[in-house]
Amino acid sequence: MELIWFYVAVVLAISDILHTTLMWKVFNNFYILLGGLIQQSTHSTWQTWLSHETMEAGFHFIVVSIIFLNPIIGIQAALIHFVIDVTHTILIRDMGELEHRALHFVIESLFFMLIYGL
């Protein structure tokens, strides 16, 4: 079995940590202002949150596509990450950082194992 499924899941996990670090520690003020602008333009917390998740998926698409030099893998990574984020936010309200990362890694690994490991 090829290990590309594992590499993609690891890169996606690193991309998620990179996104969190960049947005909440480096560009914190800009990110808060952007969130406020999106909130004002949508007038909906739900749409603001979906906009955030969509932009995060775009970030993951760019990072994974560049690392693997393959936009198909980037799209798959962005979509599975988006679906997991939306699903666990709706279904599981309280989740710690470690639980959040573990949930993503396990489901993303299984997803990529089904695609690339069989």
Image: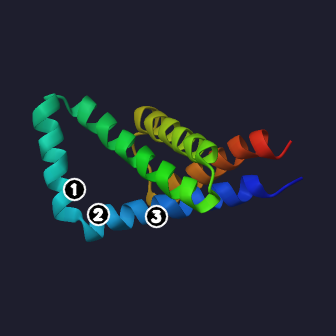
Amino acid type, residue under disc 2 in the picture: Trp
Of the 4 image quadrants, the one containing the C terminus is top right
Q: Earlier in the sequence, mark 3 or mark 1?
A: 3
Residue 31 is labelled as 1
Q: Quadrant of residue 41?
A: top left
User: Front-most of 21 and 58?
Assistant: 58
Q: Quadrant of residue 110?
A: top right
Task: Measure how far apart labels 3 and 2 are at the Cα level.
Answer: 11 Å
**Neighbour tally class for label 1: few under 14, some 14-19, many 20 plus, Cα within 10 Å:** some
Q: Residue at x 41, y 38 (%)?
A: 89
Q: Residue at x 34, y 66 (%)?
A: 22
User: Front-most of 69 and 40?
Assistant: 69
Extreme residue toward the right, this view? 1
Query: How many discs mark residues in the rendered view?
Result: 3
- Of badges 1 and 2, nearer the viewer stands 1
Which residue does the numbered mark 3 point to in the structure image?
Answer: 17
Task: Measure how far apart labels 1 and 2 are at the Cα level.
Answer: 7 Å
Judged left or right of residue 52, residue 99 is right
Amino acid type, residue under disc 3 in the picture: Ile
Which residue does the numbered mark 2 point to in the structure image?
Answer: 24
Judged left or right of residue 29, residue 88 is right
